[in-house]
Structure formats: C-alpha cells, structure tokens
C-alpha cells in the first residue's frame, strides 16, 4: 500500500511539471503577494493557474469576473468534491464574483454514469443543496441543471461549429466505438465555461483538476474564434483517497461521503493509510512520517487552522508523541462527523428556488 501511495504522489507531481512545461500553467505562489493569506494556497489546495494574473489586473482596474465550477450529478457528494467549492466560495467572498454552477446531468447520461435524466435530476437537486450549504450569496449565484436549460443547446450548436470532430476525438481519445453524444458533449462543456462571457462580457475563471484541463484548452481556442475573452483557470490538488488510491465515488472506501453515517465515517477513517510505524512501540521510538500520511493530508484540509498548527502536529508525529490510531485518526473522524452533520443540517434548510436557474 505504501508503494502504491508513493506512486500516486509521484504521478501527480510529474503531471504538474508536465503541465507547467507544455501548457503555460504557472505556480500559484507567483501570485501569493497579490492575495490575502489563506489556507487554500498555504496548504496547497490551489497549486497553479493560467491567466489568473490577468483576472486580477482587470479586477483592480474595475472589471468584474465570474466563476464557473460544475458538478456531474451521478451520486452523493464526498468531501473531495467540497474542496473545489470551497475555492469557489473563497473567490466569491473575496472578490464579490458571480458564480455559475452547472449540474451536468447530460454528461453523466452520455458517459453512461446514470441510466436516465430523471436519475440525474434527482442527484442534481441533492448535490445542489450540499453545495449551497457552504453559504453562497444567493444574489450572485446561479446553479442549474444543464439538460433543462434551453440556451445550453442553442449555444452548443454555435460552439460546435467552432470545433472539428478530429479535435474532439484527439483531445478525449475517442474512436468509432464511442457514442456521438460524448463528442457533442465537448461543445456543451465549453458552453458552460463560456456562457457568462457570452451573456455578460465578464471573463471567467474555472477552478478545476489538472486532468480536466483539456476542456479549458479547447474552450480557450473556441473563445479566440468567437472573439471573446479567454477563460482563466485555477488548478486544484485533490485529496488522495483514504486507502492511498485516487478518491472516487465508484470506490466508496476511498472517500468520506457527506451522507455517510457516524459509524461509517469512523470505520473508514480508522482504516485509512498513515505514515505511522507498524506498532505503538516503534512509533514512540522512531516517530512517524507525516509527509507520507494520508490522514495528515486530510487533517490539513479539514482540521488545522493554520500552517503553524500543521507544522506543530507534524513535529509531534515525528517525535513519536502521537499515535495514529489513538490521536490522529480519532481527531479526523470526530471532525468529519461534525462537518457532515452540519452540512446535512444546512442543506436541509436550503430553499432551492432561491438559487436554481431556469432560463
């Protein structure tokens, strides 16, 4: 398990380096002096950007911008999904940005992750309440189910004329065995990204994972052909799964879901991979390795209030003063249990009609 976890981390690091070299992506630390101190950067949640410096330049000259970040509703949300929307909320709070949240039921249908749009709609409403429980400004937030927006299809037809089948097939590795809806969905995804610019003239920034950047590159090419401002992007480093594998909704043991019971959360956390020693005696004598610890990564994401607190915890671990099963795992489990309970309580009070966009 330790070797698999290290392989995941090495691959992620290699991907970041390759993206920097090939696709004009820059480290977010270059912009730290232009942003207030925040844990999203200090803890490495936001790792890189493309053209966010342009967004900041335009903002300080008086131009507003919008944020676009979507969710494919095919099941319940886990805490990894919430990290992205924490970034979106941060941007809205700091800059007063308008936020657009497409719920891409159409994507999940054409990729075979749901059996019907009705199933997608059920999960879209469920996911919407969880996302909105983070406290978005209802005057500046529009969340919508993609297949129920008439303009999505109209705009996608226009965008499709700016693409070629060759571009789409090469970008996504498609061949003749794939259904044509997948190829057309590229136009739909680009519409989600460019819609605020098309409708309001505002440039957009999209918080995404590195593996989604292919959409951004094509969207930027389409924006250039449409003679509108190109979208910017912020790149999010997703949490590793609890067992060292990438977190995935299709592998429940890798993630903590917001709707998991207290018992299930506790059980999953107690089974999580750590950087500790095999026995308590060895841990006390030799200390642990927080740099290789999944639990420590999750503590940084959801527990520690500052890098200083994280550093102090890491030192206690290295000194052998902490034991994974007695100290770190129970701390993480208790925190996630409370967070999940609070999110579900707030989500239950969300009045979706205040946010849901039907146009």
Image: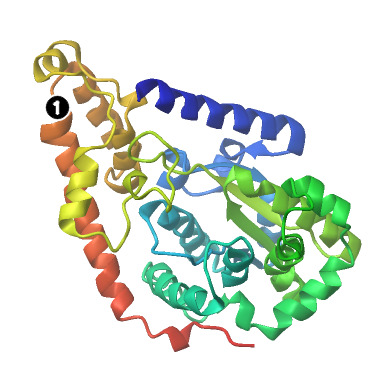
Q: Residue 39: x percent and y percent?
A: 41, 45
Q: Which residue is drawn at 13% across and 18% down?
A: 279
Q: In this view, does 162 lie above or below 234?
A: below
Q: Considering depth in this image, is 157 or 94 the residue closer to the camera?
A: 157
**138 horizontally vs 15: left or right:** left
Residue 188 seen from this side:
yes
Q: Residue at x 30, y 29 (%)?
A: 311
Residue that extends furthest to the top in the rendered view of this protein: 285
Q: In this view, does 5 lie above or below 182?
A: above
Q: Residue 312: x percent and y percent?
A: 24, 29
**112 horizontally vs 288: left or right:** right
Name the quadrant containing residue 245.
top left
**238 horizontally vs 331: left or right:** right
Q: Residue 59: x percent and y percent?
A: 66, 61
Q: Residue 183: x percent and y percent?
A: 76, 60
Q: Name the residue under label 1.
A: 323
Q: Residue at x 65, y 54 (%)?
A: 56
Residue 38 seen from this side:
no
Colour scheme of this structure image? rainbow
Quadrant occupied by the N terminus: top left
Q: Residue at x 45, y 40 (%)?
A: 246
């Amino acid at each position: 398990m330790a070797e698999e976890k290290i392989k995941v981390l090495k691959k992620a690091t290699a991907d970041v380096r390759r993206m920097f070299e090939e696709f004009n992506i820059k480290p977010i630390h270059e912009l730290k002096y232009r942003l207030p101190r925040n844990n999203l950067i200090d803890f490495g949640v936001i790792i890189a950007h493309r053209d966010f410096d342009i967004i900041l330049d335009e903002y300080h000259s008086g131009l507003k911008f919008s944020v676009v970040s979507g969710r494919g509703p095919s099941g319940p949300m886990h805490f990894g999904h919430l990290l992205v929307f924490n970034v979106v909320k941060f941007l809205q709070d700091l800059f007063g940005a308008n936020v657009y949240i497409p719920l891409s039921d159409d994507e999940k249908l054409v990729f075979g992750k749901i059996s019907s749009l009705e199933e997608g709609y059920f999960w879209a409403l469920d996911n919407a309440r969880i996302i909105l429980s983070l406290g978005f400004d209802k005057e500046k937030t529009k969340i919508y189910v993609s297949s129920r927006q008439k303009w999505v299809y109209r705009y996608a037809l226009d965008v499709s004329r700016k693409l070629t089948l060759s571009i789409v097939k090469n970008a996504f590795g498609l061949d003749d065995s794939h259904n044509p809806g997948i190829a057309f969905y590229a136009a739909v995804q680009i519409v989600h990204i460019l819609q605020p610019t098309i409708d309001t003239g505002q440039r957009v920034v999209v918080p995404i994972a590195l593996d989604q950047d292919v959409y951004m590159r094509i969207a930027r090419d389409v924006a250039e052909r449409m003679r509108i401002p190109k979208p910017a992007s912020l790149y999010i480093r997703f949490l590793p799964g609890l067992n060292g594998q990438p977190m995935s909704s299709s592998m429940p043991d890798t993630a903590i879901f917001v709707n998991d019971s207290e018992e299930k959360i506790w059980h999953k956390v107690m089974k999580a991979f750590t950087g500790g020693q095999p026995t308590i005696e060895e841990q006390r004598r030799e200390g642990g390795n927080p740099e290789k610890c999944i639990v420590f990564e999750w503590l940084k994401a959801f527990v520690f209030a500052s890098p200083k607190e994280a550093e102090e915890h890491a030192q206690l671990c290295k000194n052998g003063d902490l034991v994974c099963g007695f100290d770190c795992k129970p701390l993480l489990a208790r925190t996630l249990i409370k967070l999940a309970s609070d999110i579900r309580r707030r989500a239950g009070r969300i009045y979706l009609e205040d946010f849901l966009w039907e146009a």
